[in-house]
Image (spheres, rainbow, N blue to C red):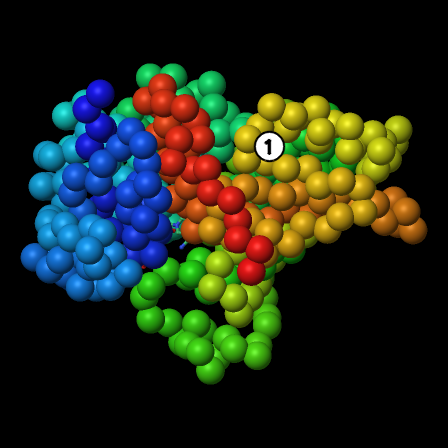
Amino acid sequence: MAKIKAGVIGATGYAGLEIVRLLLSHPFVEVEAVSSVSFEGQVISEIYPQLTGIFGETLANDAAVVDRCDVVFGSLPAGLSEPIARRCFDAGKLYIDMGADFRLKNEADYKQWYGKDYADPALHEAAVYCIPELHRARLAGAKLIGNPGCYPTSVALGLAPAVKAGAIDPATLVIDSKSGATGAGRGLALNTHYTECNEAFAPYKVAAHRHTPEIEQTLSEFAGREVRVTFVPHLLAVNRGIVSTMYANFMPGFDLAAVRKLYEAFYREEAFVKVLPDGAVANLKNVKYSNYCHISLHADTHTGRLIVVSTIDNMVKGAAGQAIQNMNIALGLEEDAGLRIIPPAF
Ligand SMILES: NC(=O)c1ccc[n+]([C@@H]2O[C@H](COP(=O)([O-])OP(=O)(O)OC[C@H]3O[C@@H](n4cnc5c(N)ncnc54)[C@H](OP(=O)(O)O)[C@@H]3O)[C@@H](O)[C@H]2O)c1
């Protein structure tokens, strides 16, 4: 069988490069074309020498990637994806957007948090937002996928079973997340300079991070009513990984044992989401470089609160791995094709 031709726009960015890295081991896909604005005309292995002798594609422009490929991954800063998505859509090609341009169904939320209107509203009608374990049925026939954000993936996977079952009071939810520095991308910024983030630890964008409406969109859907959350991200001085620790009051009639049963049933058939045994604590070192999400469940009996810890690799389950999982589903491939990566122990 001929391999599916995939292309990556923004391939020199962190998430774009991670898609290339994972797709190079995919059994049914070949990386046909990659693009860059800053490095067009250069060979990608000159910029990322770990690809030397493995992948020597010359960086093209966006249009060439769309023309040559069956599936296009766009990995660009927010606000740049609509024209590329339109070109793919009109050509009948599958487009998967890594950024936030096709995640929010409510345009007013997009305008509020990203400062822009949707320029091509018809595209947003067609766009499918999908965390596979929560929404995979939506992908049948999809041609445009808004791949979820990294924090929202860790949060939604960690909370969906409890919120859906009414086991916690969503009005009491507090979400405290930490991300490694690759979450900020490859661009230079003062807060990710070595001397600024090494030996340092602090929240940022306190209760003002752009992922808030995306988190609320999914939790509201699972609660069946509008949910508002307090979400506070922190910058952690590691390269990869997200840990989300989430707190909410138990609803009457629910305790840790009941919630554990709910989670185990919810994720029983899932290849990538693991509910850890009683007493274990989710740790980002156990999911690094992989598409797994580890969830641990805890009770604060003193205050009557459930505490959920959810951890993922922001570059894989939080970005490139989940995009490939979405592609696999949309194209009818085995969902875990190219993603059977065992996390290293150190
Ligand atoms: N990092 C993560 O953990 C993560 C997780 C989930 C989702 N995402 C999303 O994935 C997208 C890419 O993120 P990233 O972390 O890979 O960012 P990044 O490292 O900054 O990469 C973005 C790339 O886009 C390219 N680009 C093209 N046009 C550009 C323009 N006008 N301005 C700036 N860059 C432009 C740049 O490469 P050239 O100059 O070579 O073209 C740049 O390297 C973002 O939307 C981000 O929100 C990231």
Point 60% across, 23% down: residue: 269
Point 43% across, 72% down: residue: 192
Does residue 199 lie above or below 133 as drawn? below
Seen as rendered, the residue at the extreme front is: 53
The number of discs equals 1
10 Å crowding of disc 1: few (<14), some (14-19), many (20+)? some
Q: Is residue 345 visible?
A: yes
* Quadrant, the N terminus: top left
Q: Is residue 116 visible?
A: no
> Residue 148, position in %: x, y?
44, 40
Q: Report whether 96 appears left or right of 36.
A: right
> Residue 167, position in %: x, y?
77, 31
Does residue 193 lie above or below 260 as drawn? below
Q: Report whether 340 appears left or right of 31.
A: right
Point 80% across, 42% down: residue: 278
Seen as rendered, the residue at the extreme right is: 302
> Residue 198, position in %: x, y?
52, 77
The residue tagged 1 is: 220
The answer to whether mark 1 is within 8 Å of ligand 1 is no
Q: Quadrant of residue 68?
A: top left
Q: Residue 118 or 100: which is nearer the viewer?
A: 100
Q: Residue 115 or 38: which is nearer the viewer?
A: 38
Point 32% across, 48% down: residue: 21
Question: Quadrant location of ligand 1?
Answer: bottom left
Q: Residue 113 or 61: which is nearer the viewer?
A: 61
* Quadrant, the C terminus: bottom right
Q: Give SS at disc 1.
A: helix
> Residue 33, position in %: x, y?
16, 43
Amino acid residing under circle 1: Ser
